[in-house]
Structure formats: structure tokens, C-alpha cells
Amino acid sequence: MRIPPFIRYGIIPLTILSLFVFPWMLTGILMIGSGLVFPPAPFFIGILADFLYYPGHGWPHATLIGLGISVITLGVQHFVKTRIM
């Protein structure tokens, strides 16, 4: 199943916009979707989220979650490519 181009290229700006508009759970779901299209995207969106909302102490949670999503989606893409082709 191919994802239409307008969804592939529109999900990353929508995820960035969701940092400002939507609750964090929807942003997380959109980060997973953008990771399936472009695996480093959740990591960079997590950096942006920490840049905007980081309180100044503790761990940068959004960056670490984005890194985890990026690693998982990269593994999923590699697994699917090696099993299908």
C-alpha cells in the first residue's frame, strides 16, 4: 500500500503545527506517523518541543521520546524492506 504524496509531505508540517495547537498525545501519534515517512523527523520535532517547552531542569523528555520513536521507525522500515523485497 502506497501512501499518497500529499499525506507523506503534509504530515511533518502538521506534526510541527501540532506542537502549538493540539494536546501532547496527538502530537505523539503524529510523531509516529511522521517517523514512518521520514525516520529522523520525530527526533528533530522532539528537539523543537524541548526548545519550546523545556522547564530548565531534568531530562529533555521530548528529545528522548523522539529519539526512541526514530530508532523504532527506522528498525520497522528496515525490517519491512528486507522482508518484502
Image: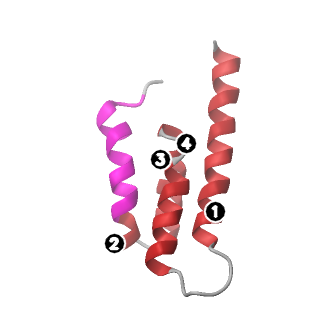
Q: Amino acid at mark 3?
A: Ser
- Distance, label 2 to label 1, CA atoms, is 19 Å
Residue count near mark 2 (Cα–Cα under 10 Å), binned few <14, some 14–19, many ≥20: few
Gap in angstroms between the C-alphas marked 1 and 4:
13 Å
Q: Which mark, residue 34?
A: 3
Q: CA distance from mark 3 to mark 2?
A: 17 Å
Disc 3 from disc 1: Cα separation = 14 Å
**Residue 33 lies in magenta, yes or no?**
no
Q: Earlier in the sequence, mark 2 or mark 4?
A: 2
Say the numbered circle drawn on residue 39: 4
Q: Is residue 16 left or right of residue 27?
A: left
Q: Residue 54 in the image: x percent, y percent?
A: 53, 81
> x and y percent of residue 30 in the render?
47, 55
Mark 1–mark 4 contact, CB under 8 Å?
no
Say whether residue 45 is left or right of residue 68: left
- Please, is residue 3 above or below residue 61 in the view? above
Disc 2 to disc 4, how far (Cα)?
23 Å
Task: Tell me which label, 3 or 4, sits earlier in the chain.
Answer: 3
Q: Secondary structure at mark 1?
A: helix
The residue indicated by pointer 2 is 21
Quarter of the figure with residue 81 = top right
Q: Tell me the SS state at disc 4.
A: loop
As for residue 16 lying within the magenta part, the answer is yes
